[in-house]
Amino acid sequence: MAYLLKNISNLVTCAQQGKDKGARKGKNASEIGLIKNGNVITVNDRIVFAGGTSALKLYLLKNKIKNLSEIDAAGKTVMPGFIDSHTHLVFAGSRSDEYEMRIKGSSYEEIAKAGGGISSTVNKVRKASGGELTRAAEKRLGNFISYGTTTLEAKSGYGLDVKTELKMLEVINKLNKKNKYGIDIYPTFLGAHSVPKGICKEEYIEIICSEMIPAVAEGGLAKFIDVFCEKGYFSAKDSERILSTGARFGMIPKLHTDQFYSIGGIDTAIKVKAISVDHLEVLKSNDIKKLRKKNIIATLLPGASYFLDISYPPARELIANEIPVAIATDFNPGSSMTENMQIIMSLSSLKMKMSSEEIINAATINGAYALFIQDISGSIEPGKQADLLIFDFPSYNDLIYHYGVNQLEKVMKKGRFAN
Ligand code: NIG
Ligand code: FE
């Protein structure tokens, strides 16, 4: 299979001129590697060429490509597939009842204290079979890809016992190996999402560290480890213990932190060399300063701010302080029930005042850095995986401006059209 997408009005490569300088930050966060009248050639699952018309002619003179199908993309915009680097893809049931309660005035915290929240999903996930969880998740993958997500991260965290945490991770790993759309799914162990009923926190942390983490590592079931560092969940100290144990077993730390309260999660993330800090709705200026030059991605989840009607993370201050920003859905049944990265991009613009260029980098190459897959995904460059989106508009600005309508025409995942 080989394709030439030609005459692309706006080819947004998200590639870096010259040497790649790492995740996009500061001024560099606005560099999207735009090529007007661009062309892309893919062979099998890889990109082999991306460039302007004269470079294309030269390339085709030097390289003979068999059975090249040509697609005229005049009037279209092509960009890298979106990378949703924070999701809770696998769960059972719905929490629409809690949503209604929140609309009537109850808060997320109040609902959780009254027995709803994460623990209500835990009850349903414990009862569900692996097959049921897989079918529900695969249906959601169809929603993800229809809005342009070609790679995602997926967390456990609705089991909270050894058996069910492993069941969730097995579902994620199985789906990564095989799903209808070829979407890549990177698994994260989030046993420390909440303390399950009937056991005290210290006892549960002991189970996480001495039973769950070794079992997850033994099965090779998770690339990342994550903790919900929050008042009423896990403290900064708890998080440090759990994340450093995970790291010793080969998992890369991530951290849910500063969503409702700022309780020291940023110090912990720096100590354990986390790859990303996620949420950050109430992040303080002195913590932003601490994150400078630390090579930690700030993963912002404006869908959770919208859905819970709370404050938005300080994207402008993060970018001004040269901290790389990624954006993700946080897709989950309690605080962000959407698979749609395009909505997240619109919220990033209107509510966090990010520019279109910053948003596109945050949804692609910086998401790749947050998953440590920057060498294979996140930009349109020779050698990378052929994960491309074709939009039916000539200028990339239209993606953010024309909101609430899906203008995605075609999705190419690993060199095949997925729709
Ligand atoms: O990322 N903050 C913690 N965990 C999820 C919510 C999970 C749930 O409510 O089911 C989040 O927002
Ligand atoms: Fe989350």
Image (tube, grey):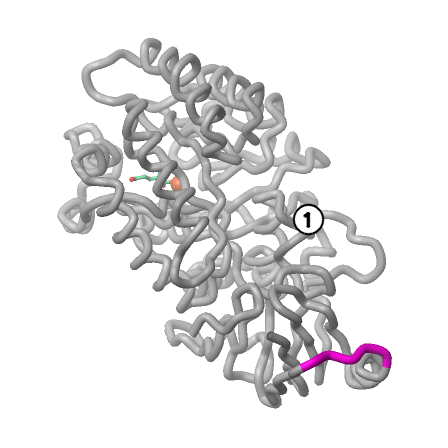
41 and 329: which is toward the camera:
41
| Figure quarter occupied by ligand 2 | top left
**Chain part drawn in magenta:** 62-66
| Residue 305 seen | no
Query: Which residue position holds label 1?
Result: 23
Amino acid type at image mark 1: Ala
Magenta stretch, main secondary structure, is: loop
The yes-or-no answer for disc 1 within 8 Å of ligand 2 is: no
Would residue 286 be counted in the magenta stretch?
no
249 and 399: which is toward the camera:
249
Asked which secondary structure carries label 1, the reply is loop
The answer to whether residue 227 is above or below residue 336 is above
User: In the image, is 302 to the left or to the right of 319?
Assistant: left
Residue drawn at (37%, 27%), measured in percent from left and top?
Answer: 191
228 and 82: which is toward the camera:
82
Determine which quarter of the picture holds residue 181. Answer: bottom left
Question: Where does residue 379 sit, x and y in percent of width and height?
Answer: 66, 61
Determine which quarter of the picture holds residue 381. Answer: bottom right
Question: Where does residue 356 sit, x and y in percent of width and height?
Answer: 58, 66
209 and 261: which is toward the camera:
209
Q: Quadrant of the C terminus?
A: bottom left
Residue drawn at (54%, 29%), measured in percent from left and top?
Answer: 251
